[in-house]
Image (cartoon, helix red, strand yellow):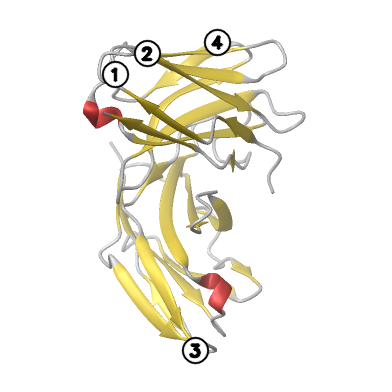
Amino acid sequence: AQTVTQSQPEMSVQEAETVTLSCTYDTSESDYYLFWYKQPPSRQMILVIRQEAYKQQNATENRFSVNFQKAAKSFSLKISDSQLGDAAMYFCAYRSAMAGNTPLVFGKGTRLSVIA
Amino acid sequence: ETGVTQSPTHLIKTRGQQVTLRCSSQSGHNTVSWYQQALGQGPQFIFQYYREEENGRGNFPPRFSGLQFPNYSSELNVNALELDDSALYLCASSLGWGRGGQETQYFGPGTRLLVL
């Protein structure tokens, strides 16, 4: 079974600074997807960014980028120019690329605080 | 906003009772997945419905059951409620049945269930 580990329960960052959230995962599969989801106090899980394991290039979405190290099974999220609205729980998630809609496997999350 | 809606937003039940939670999927989506998120934890996969049939289940007992209707909306039913069932219940819709992960899962705002 696949597992996802987020070793930082809480992180904080000054507004306009950069922060990196860590995630490691364990799998015997070679083809999969990795995701970062944001969950603000409103509770709605919002997709931030996703990475396909067969792509070597790291995904980027505006101020959000990832550092995907397949051999090390590491998938960190970098938030640049942090904004107050970035404050939320961030979850790293894994999804197998087997045929069909496979479920997401989530880590326990990292609570990010942004200091004005 | 993802277009996925859930009702009710909050619910209080007592131990032993039964509860039904509802989810309307995003327009055009034929797959609904349900997740349980306990306080301070990441979401855990309960089960998934594709075109009105259950086609995947996590490690949850049979008292957790569900339905998907012809319009692809879905219900989660929990019988004989226990205190540990207190959690945020999230549903996510996607367009299946392609390669796993290719179809992004869009989450609803969740239903907060408290069992006393």
Front position in the image: A94 or B12: B12
Residue identifier under label 1: B81
Real-space Cα separation, disc 3 to disc 1, in angstroms: 46 Å
Disc number at residue A17?
3
Residue A85, above or below B8: below
* Mark 4 or mark 1, earlier in chain: 4
Q: Give the amino acid at mark 2.
A: Gln
Mark 1, secondary structure of its residue: loop
> Residue B78, image x and y in percent?
37, 16
Label 3 with label 1: CB-CB less than 8 Å = no
Left or right: B24, with A73 as reference point:
right
Would you call the spot at circle 2 few (<14 residues within 10 Å), some (14-19), or many (20 or more)? some
Q: Are marks 4 and 3 on the same chain?
A: no
Residue at point 51%, 38% (across, down): B110
Picture quarter containing residue B100?
A: top right
Left or right: B44, with A58 as reference point:
left
Mark 2, secondary structure of its residue: loop
Number of numbered discs:
4
